[in-house]
Amino acid sequence: MLNQLITLISQHTKLSEIDIVLCSRYFEPLHSTKNTLLAAQGKVPEYLYFIATGFMRLFYVDENGEENTTFIGTQNSFITAFLPFIHQIPSNENIACITDCEILRISNANLKTLIEQSEHFKQFSLIIFEQAMHITTIRANDLATLNAEQRYKKLISQQPAFIQHVPIQYIASYLGMKPESLSRIRRQIIS
């Protein structure tokens, strides 16, 4: 798992041997099973997670008790409730494993220490947070400007693995629709 993380970071910045040792010191490996809740709504997020294998999601439960998925993470991506994690404030989102997952996690305190000790990781952490903001902005724009079918077609063209590994109710929620609507769209596309 650590090799995956090092390979990903190395695509963006050159790491020294010391940087690699620091990463191995501060990132903890973790195996989590399907449906494990790693962070709870109303609590301060403790960790930033790197997904080595599997699928995870960010979601919140609304006042009607319905789950609303705001992000789906897959292999080689990072997941947390970013602003609450950075500012160490309670989050309105949960983090859960959709499938069994192999992950690396780093606490907020250890991330700050790593950033202080490694200029290369500092550069990479900025990229992580910029990407998170970019993904959030694109999703908000898609929800505002694309119809349901266009959103689904865009998802299957950009993330085809979601269709095979993520339950339809999570995909539908992420796309801003009910599962019945997504099922209808899928039938129309197939026929």
Image (cartoon, rainbow, N blue to C red):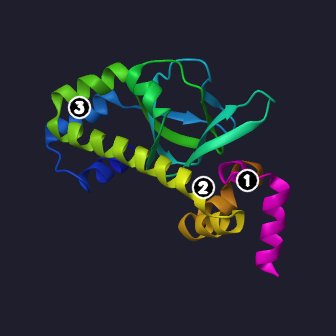
Cα distance in 3D space between marks 2 and 1: 16 Å
For badge 1, the amino acid type reads: Ala
Which part of the image, by quadrant, shows the C terminus? bottom right
Was residue 142 drawn as part of the magenta stretch in this picture?
Answer: no
Residue mark closest to the camera, 1 vs 3: 1
Which SS type dominates the magenta stretch? helix
Q: Is residue 186 above or below residue 29?
A: below
Disc 3 marks a residue whose amino acid type is: Leu
Label 2 crowd bin: few (<14), some (14–19), many (20+), radius 10 Å: few
2 and 1 marks in contact (CB < 8 Å): no
Q: Earlier in the sequence, mark 2 or mark 1?
A: 2
What mark, if any, has residue 172 been given in the picture? 1
N-term mark: 1 or 3:
3
Which residues, given as a range, are shown in magenta?
A: 171-191
Question: 121 left or right of 41?
Answer: left
What distance separates the C-alpha of mark 2 from that of mark 3? Answer: 42 Å
Is residue 144 positioned above or below 94 on the image? below
Residue under the image location 51 percent in, 18 percent down: 44
Q: Amino acid at mark 2?
A: Ala
Disc 3 residue crowd, few under 14, some 14–19, many 20+, Cα 10 Å: some
- Mark 3 sits on what residue? 22
Quarter of the N terminus within the rendering: top left
Res 115 quadrant in image: top left
Which numbered disc covers residue 144? 2
Estimate the x, y position of residue 170 in percent, counting from the top left.
71, 48
